[in-house]
Image (tube, rainbow, N blue to C red):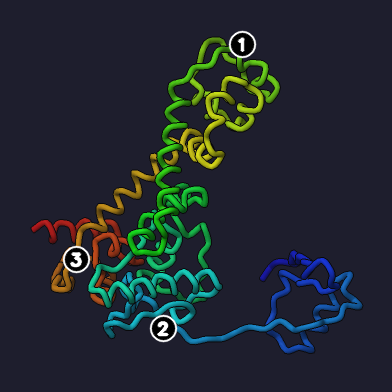
Amino acid sequence: DDEDRNQIFVEPEGWDTVEVYVNGFSTSLPENVQYDALRKIPGFENAKMFRPGYAIEYDFFQPTQLQPSLETKLISGLFFAGQINGTTGYEEAASQGLMAGINAHLLTQNKEALVLKRDEAYIGVLIDDLINKGTDEPYRMFTSRAEYRILLRQDNADIRLTEKSYLLGLADQERYNRVLEKIEKAKEVTALLLKTSIAPEEVNAFLESVNSAPITQKLKLDKIVSRPHIGISALMENIPMVKELLESYDPEFIEQAEIAIKYEGYIQREQEQADKLVRLDEVKLTEKLDYASMPSLSYEAKDKLIKMKPKTLGQASRISGVSPADISVLMVYIGR
């Protein structure tokens, strides 16, 4: 490593304790080595160590041996979740446990497995990565691993997933109704902003106060909301007409409408990309496909496809080593 410095965060463990967590000094070295190293940090010359750091080593099974439901390909009814699949972290384990539990239940009911897509949930990205790419180091779910981050927001998690939860019997009627109301009311707020005009004399004083260009003629409110640094709540506080228009709506519904307006172009573009992937995922690949006898496939693609046995064209496209050209070849074969 060519770094000559390392950032360390000293995090208090509570209001009433002298204990601090030394973040960035993570180590699994012997206790005496840790202690000596700790006291070499400037300012820590007289530090006391309550508990040494530690590391856990564990074996794992390469997760490419799993179906998208987390059921093992070899043994029907056996599901794997958590560190056994090569992941690290509590959230990673919990999310897999949830999915494996749901799918084990669905299997006993002879129902189709629940598989979350990459544009529906971070769980979908995590499982898709593991089963298609495998892992050679402990896997953590970073946001950067998801290509549809604009769709996978915390403000719309309920909109993305509550219906699935309701159909499984996890979310109750009241919770589902609340989400349906949020979707409906956010649309109402968006529609109001798209059709209501505001005059220069009503808004210019506010626009100038936040260093935003004044308007010279009547404009629809969505054009004002789509400007950077201008939020609906600030408009409601400063412009009586906007307050009157929206004050009966829950702030959560207003926020949803605001995001839809501000990021419309980005959201739409990402949704189109996600829909393309969904179309590939709808093309099923049968176990009978003889990849070895397809001369136009690359050797690596043949090898990976025979080994991985993907269920859909989309899944095949996400296996490392299978190129877009290989996917085109598969499409031609399936088309026949």
* Foreground: disc 1 or disc 2: 1
Mark number displayed over residue 61 = 2
Cα distance, mark 3 to mark 2? 25 Å
Q: Amino acid at mark 3?
A: Leu
Assign a secondary structure to mark 1: helix
Residue 48 percent across, percent down from the top left: 86, 81
At x 67%, y 16%, the residue is 205
Q: Reply above or below: 139 against 62.
A: above
How many residues crowd mark 1 within 10 Å: few (<14), some (14–19), many (20+)? few
| Quadrant position of the N terminus in the picture | bottom right
Q: Reply above or below: 114 against 258.
A: below
Q: Reply above or below: 196 against 234.
A: above
Assign a secondary structure to mark 3: loop
Q: Is residue 5 visible?
A: no
- Taking the view exactly as shown, the residue that stands out farthest to the front is 174
Q: Amino acid at mark 1?
A: Glu
Residue 274 percent across, percent down from the top left: 35, 50
Pointers 3 and 2 in contact (C-beta within 8 Å): no
- Taking the view exactly as shown, the residue that stands out farthest to the left is 336
At x 41%, y 60%, the residue is 171
Q: Amino acid at mark 2?
A: Phe
Residue 17 percent across, percent down from the top left: 84, 72
| Quadrant position of the C terminus in the picture | bottom left
- Residue under label 3: 285
How many residues crowd mark 3 within 10 Å: few (<14), some (14–19), many (20+)? some
- Residue under label 1: 201
**Depth check, front residue: 294 or 154:** 154
Ranked by sequence position, the earlier of labels 1 and 2 is: 2
* Foreground: disc 1 or disc 3: 1
Ranked by sequence position, the earlier of labels 3 and 2 is: 2
